[in-house]
Amino acid sequence: MKKVILLLIVLAALIGVAIVTKDNSENRLKPAAAREKLLPDLDVNVVRKVRIREYDTNKGTFNTVTLAITGDQWGVGERSGYPAAFEKLGKMLMDLKEQKAGKQKKYGPGAWADLKLKEPKDGVKDEGAGLSIELLGESDKVLRTLVLGKNVTSSTVGREASPFGGGGNERYARVNDDGDTVWQVDGQFYDIRPMPEDWVDKSFIEVTKIKEIEVTPATAADGWKATRKDETGEFTLIDAKPGEDFDKDKASLSTVLANPTFNDVVPKDKATADFMKDATKAKITTFEGFTYNVQFIKKGSGSDEKHYISVSTTGDFPKERPAVKDEKPEDKKKADDEFAAKKKTFEEKLAKEKKSEGWVFEISSYTLGGLEKKRSEILKDKPAEPAKNAGAPPAPPTPTPLAPPTPPAPPAPPKTPITVTTPPVSVPASPAPAAPMPPKPELKAPPKDPLPVTPVPAKPADTPKPAASAPAPASAKPADAPKPADPAPAKPEEPKK
């Protein structure tokens, strides 16, 4: 019996060891062979498709972008094959090829969810899934699958963490060929995101040296047409009505679509014929012979407002240089070479911009500039009109003259007015006493034969002189006449001895 019990104890111990061993094997397994590169022997020239997937835990959405080569051109699958940004794609492939393996970790599948290293599945909302980069060759054969997980908080691979704290530039990574091995790589791959708009080729049209612009909105009255004589001239309205003048400060037409870009491309299944219904049309011609036929429309409002544009380009420029009479051979060769180079530039520009035809682009609101202006919004403001009255126009205001300073008030006049009568004066043949003169206000004593007058009270010294109530005769000027003197008796002449 004791032997049976002992055997059971040993069996239980073995089972316990097996369970512990199994748990450890799920979290810490044998590592893959050490190596220098994360994706050894990767041949980027055989890659024909790249699929990037991720579950966005913040938004609760599953994002995918597929980049595939068709013929000699890479395209974005989620954007109906619109040309991909080849330089960005090529840089990503070369970065993956040259990526160092870094420090090796031995975390098993049980720890992958915590490190966000589980491979995302299409449409599966798994918060333990990371960012998956799948490289495929011919016939969609999987070449490599790389899963990028959480960022590492230490500073750099193989170095001590910074004593000042903060995160480093490292990230956990896992390669499907390595089984359960986890790598700590130098780099966080910020520019690799599963967003289709990040991978479309953003090269676009470039309108320069504008000669004429014609805008035709859905409401005909809002349309307008402007032109200029040369590349540096000012625009003027064609068929301007009386009182209409173009205001260059309200619409800078010379730089319209000079260096535009777009945010995204509308897939073909959404950009149907009705998508651009009621769009405003614009025709732009340049001095170099390019013509751009543009349509643009605004959809939504508020935070959902978006602007869309479609464009087609044509070119009409000289194919040959006109002959010049008596041109020297060396001058002809130089001019022909310059003309050929310019012609090639125009042809390349036209071919590049024709790739945008047939697509609808989402743009920013400021991209169109003056093209979105209505006719009334590009005209100079009219001067304000005076207010209209039913009656006669109001008289202009009469300026009020400044009042002169008020002199001191004269003393109050006596109740009985003073009456002065001066009789005519006759001059005797012989000397006679002079006729008395009218009294002056300053006289202290009246003349010898004063006329009956009513006494006048004396004025203060600073009181102005009052005006006489009756004018004096013209022959008598009291102010200028000398003071009369008493006549002296005639002295008899003494007889001569």
Image (cartoon, rainbow, N blue to C red):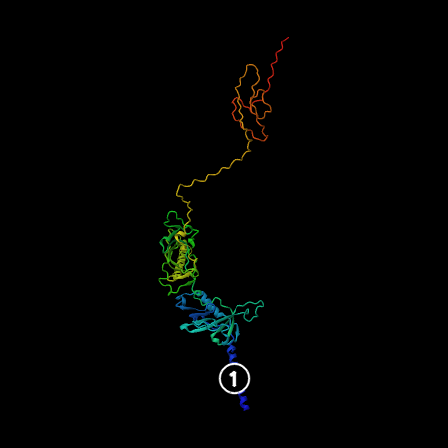
Task: Pick whichever, 160 or 361, lies toward us.
Answer: 361
The answer, for residue 289, to whether it is visible in the render is no
| Residue at the extreme right | 497
Task: Pick whichever, 479 or 261, lies toward us.
Answer: 479
Residue 419 x/y as whole percent: 53, 24
Q: Residue 266: name its quadrant.
A: bottom left
Secondary structure under tag 1 reads helix
Residue 306 x/y as whole percent: 42, 60
Label 1 Cα crowd, 10 Å radius (few <14 / some 14-19 / many 20+): few
Looking at the figure, which quarter contains the C terminus? top right
Residue 31 x/y as whole percent: 51, 77
As drawn, 199 above or below 106: above
Q: Identify the residue position indicated by label 1 in the image.
A: 15
The answer, for residue 5, to whether it is visible in the render is yes
Looking at the figure, which quarter contains the N terminus? bottom right
| Residue at the extreme bottom | 1
